[in-house]
Image (spheres, helix red, strand yellow):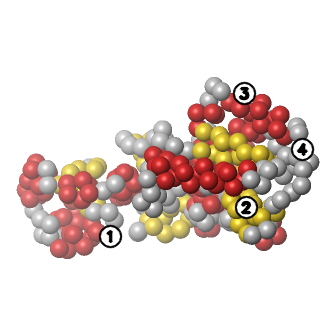
Amino acid sequence: MHPILQSVAALRFGVFTSQESLTAGYALDDIKSALRSGRWLRLRKGVYVSRDRLEAADDRERHLMDCVAVLLSLQPGPVLSHSSAARLHRLLVPRVETRDVRVTSVDQWRRGRGYRVARAALPPDDVVPWLTYRTTTVARTLVDCAREWSQLQAVVAMDAALNDGLVRRAELQDAVHSARHRTGASAAARALGLSDGRAESPLETEGRLALLAAGLPTPELQVELHNAHGFVARVDAWYEDAALALEFDGRVKYLDPRDCRTPGEVLWEEKRREDRVRGLDVRFVRIAKADLGGSWPGVAAGIARLLATPYTGPRRYTVVRRREPGADAEAA
């Protein structure tokens, strides 16, 4: 590829236009030849990417290439939004979410091949620069998505964004307030009310919502237990009165362990950690993804029985609570 065209394409994930090709010195026959040979691939009419660049891209980059192609094809004005902005900001996007490019404009609503334009106000505080375009902020993006996604999907995304430090709770509250007259705003408000940035995985979020749906109280999250010698363990969820710890147990921890550990090593470490917690006379329940299915009523009933029996023995531990990431100091 001509270095001038290559430098232009490099600024936007390898995407370039026919006009930029002509400016770099390519003739129309050169462009047609590159397309026929497969060296260049057409993303949209007059918008291309090299085969090598496309094949080297991961799923997120491929979607952002499509985003650039759509924005190049539209008149100036629309900004990246909804699930497309969520992918850009590295938020958690449901696997079932459409691959369509999502953009928002203040003066038009339309659908086209592979894209949707929503019509909505775009206050200056709701957008940030991206390449030579603009995208909605993390807070606005999460609220726009929560207006359309299921409750679980929305809370999972908010929990993860808060935990990763991508957004602050106050920013989400402002975004929900700004969206109060839009369709689905109440769903976004409910999702925010259920969110907790201390959750460290989608399974923890799903488990917490399942506890609430079963009529059980909201547990404290990511609580540390200490004994006279110091730190013993951190537990996913905690009920103080019952001295009950819950652990949401995902398979990935065992099947694809971190830090070059073997699955057997992880399993042994988890057993020893549970032994240390039980050694404090703390009651301990593990909840796997499968437990949230058909067997959940029985699991929830067992937790309810434990909660109905407050722990009355001596407390041989102290509890150290963690502040929610992204929470204001006054809310801590």
Mark 2 or mark 3: which comes first in sequence? 2
- Disc 1 marks a residue whose amino acid type is Leu
Mark 1 or 3, closer to the camera: 3
* Element type at mark 1: loop
Query: Separation of disc 2 and disc 3 at Cα?
Result: 28 Å
Contact check, label 2 and label 3, Cβ < 8 Å: no
Mark 4 or mark 3: which comes first in sequence? 3
| Residue 298 disc label | 3
Which of the two residues, 154 or 222, is positioned nearer the viewer here?
Answer: 222
Query: Separation of disc 4 and disc 3 at Cα?
Result: 20 Å
Q: Is residue 35 visible?
A: yes
- Disc 3 marks a residue whose amino acid type is Gly
Residue for badge 2? 224
Residue for badge 4? 310
* Element type at mark 4: loop
Q: In which image quadrant can residue 329 be found?
A: bottom right
Contact check, label 2 and label 1, Cβ < 8 Å: no
| 13 lies above or below 218 | below
Mark 2 or mark 1: which comes first in sequence? 1
Query: Separation of disc 4 and disc 1 at Cα?
Result: 61 Å
Query: Separation of disc 2 and disc 1 at Cα?
Result: 46 Å
Neighbor class of circle 4 (other Cα within 10 Å; few <14, some 14-19, many 20+) is some
Residue drawn where x is 28% and y is 69% of the image: 10
Residue drawn where x is 8% and y is 59% of the image: 30
Residue for badge 1? 11
How far from the left and from the top, in percent, is residue 174? Answer: 72, 61
175 vs 36, left or right, is right
- Disc 2 marks a residue whose amino acid type is Glu
How far from the left and from the top, in percent, is residue 117? Answer: 48, 48
Mark 4 or 1, closer to the camera: 4
Mark 2 or mark 4: which comes first in sequence? 2
